Image (cartoon, helix red, strand yellow):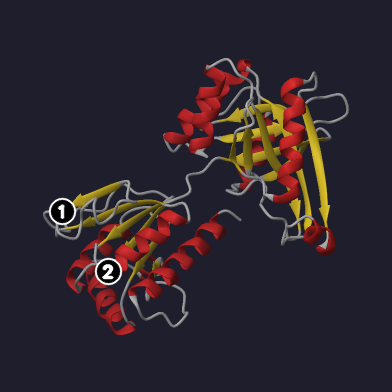
Amino acid sequence: MQHLLDRLVTTLEQGQSPVLCAIVRNLGSAPRTSGTRMLVLADGTTLGSVGGGAVEGACQAKARELLHGAAAFAVLNFEMNAASAAEAGMICGGSVSILLQRVDPEMLTLLRTMRSDYLQGKRPMLLTLLPQGDLPPRLVLLGSEGNDEVPADLRTEILRKNRRAPFIALHQGREVFVEPLVHPGRVHLAGAGHVALATARIAAFVGFEVVVMDDRQEFANSERYPEASRVRVLDSFADCIKDLGPDDYVIIVTRGHIHDREVLAQALRTDAGYIGMIGSRRKRAAVYDSLRQDGFTDADLARVHCPIGLAIGADTPEELALSIMAELVQVRAGKNG
């Protein structure tokens, strides 16, 4: 989302009006989910994807019409059964509705605010009043401080749902596509050994931001972790985890039980959305008993995923990394549901 917002703002600042394509409804085995977006620029360049194949080709063709014609928006509906999906070169069936909207310079202020709120972790919500009859689509931003343009009853309904995944609300007979703009997640790897190395690569590949920390510089360095946004060389593991929120995922894979226990205690004092620790059930029992003596409750310890990862029979560092990241993707998907 950040790259798309950056490009969208830059394009508008250059005086150009791109077309934004957004999946606003999907049913069945559609290639992409609601909220997925693609930007089409005047020269035909695209950023993002709405599923590839014939669907994306049709969107690109319609976007060119909007870029050079009088119409400012269009809605494309696709019904793909197994046969038509195969004929179109796609592996998915299902149905999808895509809103295409030319973004004009008067929307620059809203988009700048949206980008700023997103980067600051304020979790803004983008509301799209879907076209109805002669009424064109309209974008409204609902930020952390609210917005006077959003009716109070609609704002209350949206906040009551407390959803991270996009959804459609109904207000005065008109559909409103509500898209919470949340961070894809930040993985904090406590420990920079072989399991962490493999985990970092998969984490970055599936869209997580990666932070690595260890007290061994020969393990914790940018050459070894080029995909990490930050590599921290610690004096010790004391006070290495703090001020984390729901979009932070802590993976504890240090070289010893003492360090694992130290990091786990710190993580439990934060609001991290995921806390996982590598180790056997025997190790878990010993660490948990120690933490209980420090005042942690069973409810606190229930937050911890240990043994970490999905039970797929993983053995090698790469297999363990796969099981760990499968669990994180599962947790992230659950948060977004």
The kind of residue tagged 2 is His
Which element carries disc 2, helix, strand or loop? helix
- Name the residue tied to disc 2: 194
Number of on-image labels:
2
Question: Callout 1 environment at 10 Å: few (<14), some (14 to 19), or many (20+)?
Answer: some
Q: In the rendering, at what x and y percent does residue 192 appear? A: 24, 62
Q: Along the horizontal axis of the image, is 332 left or right of 298? A: right
Q: In the rendering, at what x and y percent does residue 53 appear? A: 71, 50
Residue ID at (83%, 60%) = 81
- Name the residue tied to disc 1: 234
- Residue 145 appears in the figure: no
Question: Callout 2 environment at 10 Å: few (<14), some (14 to 19), or many (20+)?
Answer: some
Task: Looking at the picture, tell me which residue is in the foreground, 206 or 299.
Answer: 206
Q: In the rendering, at what x and y percent does residue 88 appear? A: 78, 55
Q: Name the mark nearer the viewer: 1 or 2.
A: 2
Residue ID at (58%, 15%) = 15
Vertical order, 93 against 130 (above or below): below
Q: Along the horizontal axis of the image, is 65 left or right of 110? A: right
Q: Earlier in the sequence, mark 1 or mark 2?
A: 2
